[in-house]
């Protein structure tokens, strides 16, 4: 699975509507020469996806000292993050991201690792076992 495909998997597991990716939205299309798209690390989400929900679902992973989402651009919500920092885009970048969300992840990233364990495991039993393990490990430290 390419890193951009794990973005889709992460969003779908969170219940966010994600449309099928065209070649232009994933590894092809016309982008800047240094685009993460050509490395399999980026994906664009257009009108066949819930763009607002996508931008909001990924915001926490794009913000901070060690972000796994290294680019998150969506003009209608004023979301522009690169390498963990919010920035003010130039006019071209703002115009270019009016109709889609652009997401790029750090190389080697599998966003599914950032899902809550209950979603990954698909049930309360997994959550319960995780809570027991955390409690056991915390008790072992004391």
Image (cartoon, helix red, strand yellow):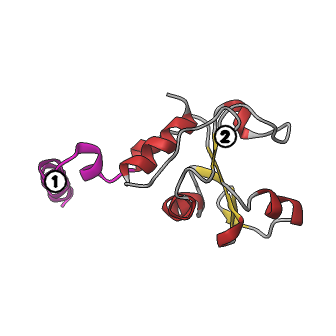
Secondary structure, mark 1, is helix
> Residue 119, how many percent across, how many down?
28, 50
Work out whether residue 64 or residue 3 is closer to the camera in this orientation and state it. Answer: 3
Work out whether residue 131 or residue 69 is closer to the camera in this orientation and state it. Answer: 69
Cα separation between marks 1 and 2: 48 Å
Secondary structure, mark 2, is loop
Magenta highlight range: 115-142
* First in sequence: mark 1 vs mark 2: 2
Where is residue 121, by image quadrant? top left
Q: Residue at x 59, y 58 (%)?
A: 62
Q: Is residue 80 left or right of residue 4?
A: right
Residue extending farthest to the front is 48
Residue extending farthest to the top is 1
Work out whether residue 47 or residue 139 is closer to the camera in this orientation and state it. Answer: 47
Dot label at residue 56 = none
Q: Is residue 25 left or right of residue 50?
A: right
Where is residue 23, by image quadrant? top right
Question: Do the residues under discs 1 and 2 have CB atoms within 8 angstroms?
Answer: no
Q: Residue at x 36, y 48 (%)?
A: 13
136 in magenta = yes
Which is closer to the viewer, label 1 or label 2? Answer: 2
Q: Residue at x 61, y 43 (%)?
A: 106
141 in magenta = yes
- Residue that badge 1 annotates: 140
> Residue 97, how many percent across, how many down?
74, 58
Please identify the dominant SS of the magenta region: helix
In the displayed structure, 45 sits above or below 94; it is above
- Residue that badge 2 annotates: 25
- Within 10 Å of disc 1 (Cα), the crowding (few <14, some 14-19, many 20+) is few
> Residue 139, how many percent across, how many down?
14, 58
Q: Residue at x 76, y 35 (%)?
A: 29
Q: Quadrant of the C terminus?
A: bottom left
């Amino acid at each position: 699975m390419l890193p951009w495909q794990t973005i889709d998997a992460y969003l779908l597991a969170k219940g966010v509507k994600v449309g099928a990716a065209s070649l232009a939205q994933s590894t092809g299309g016309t982008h800047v020469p240094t685009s993460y798209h050509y490395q399999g690390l980026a994906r664009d989400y257009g009108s066949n996806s819930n763009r607002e929900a996508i931008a909001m679902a990924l915001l926490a992973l794009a913000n901070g000292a060690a972000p796994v989402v290294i680019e998150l651009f969506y003009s209608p919500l004023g979301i522009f993050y690169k390498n963990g920092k919010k920035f003010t885009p130039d006019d071209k970048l703002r115009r270019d991201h009016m109709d889609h969300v652009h997401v790029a992840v750090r190389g080697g990233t599998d966003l599914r690792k950032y899902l809550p364990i209950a979603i990954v495991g698909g049930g309360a039993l997994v959550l319960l076992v995780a809570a027991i393990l955390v409690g056991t490990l915390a008790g072992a430290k004391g």
